[in-house]
Amino acid sequence: MIGTEVEPDWHVHGGNFEEGVTASVRATNEAAKVLVASEDELQRAARHKTDPEARFHYRYQAASLAWEAAKLMPDNSDDTARVLWTAGSWLKNRDPQTADIFYKALVRRNRKTALGMEADRIRWFPQLDEQGNLIPRKPSHVDSMPLPEPPEPATEQPPDTETDEVRMTILSWGNAM
């Protein structure tokens, strides 16, 4: 797997920038002042396209190969979970919709593995350390909030059933967390 020197990967810029003269610009000769693209150059550019025609296309190729490998692997296997997690992680930041296919397969096929359970719990790809161990997710602001104190029973006023229902609903949220 390799990246292209110019579009769409721009290895010429270390992959850090998406700029330069493209085959489509050369074909129209809009920018040509001295050297116009030859017919042979345009034909070669048309013959050697990436699949898909997207930046970091090799990640998609690698993810596709991983998908095919995972199809041959058993469900609820740490190895299968790791293959789906790895391939999805190659795409998750740039193309979350495609990565979601890997996430769903990870959870559906490997829910009984630690990686599958954590992915299901956080609803995305968990973080792993350099040894491949799960990094526990820090509690969110809501998770770290103390539960509200139950209300004192009213002795002088008749009970307000609507307010009590709201309080019970809020208390049940706290217990569900």
Image (cartoon, rainbow, N blue to C red):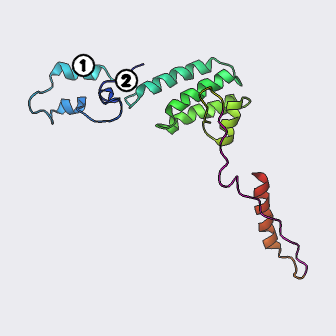
Image coords of residue 63 (percent x, y): 51, 25
Q: Is residue 22 left or right of residue 163?
A: left
Nearer the observer, 93 or 149: 149
* Residue at the outermost left position: 34
Are the residues flagged by discs 2 and 1 in contact, CB closer than 8 Å? Answer: no
Residue 119 location, quadrant: top right
Nearer the observer, 83 or 41: 83
Disc 1 on helix, strand or loop?
helix
Hey, what amino acid is under mark 1?
Answer: Arg
Q: Which residue lies furthest to the right in this view?
A: 155
Q: In which quarter of the image is residue 38?
A: top left
Residue at 66 percent of width and 29 percent of height: 133
Q: Which residue is drawn at 64% across and 30% down?
A: 106
Per the image, the residue denoted by label 2 is 3
**In magenta segment, residue 145:** yes
- Residue at 69 percent across and 28 percent down: it is 110
Q: Which amino acid does label 2 sit on?
A: Gly
Give the residue displayed 58% in from the left and 18% down from the top: 69
**Considering only vertical position in the picture, is 24 above or below 166?**
above
Start-end of magenta stretch: 134-155
Can you identify the residue that label 1 sits on?
A: 44
Report how far apart the C-alphas of labels 2 and 1 lie in the structure.
Answer: 17 Å
Asked if residue 110 is positioned above or below residue 165 in the image, the reply reads above
Callout 2: SS: loop
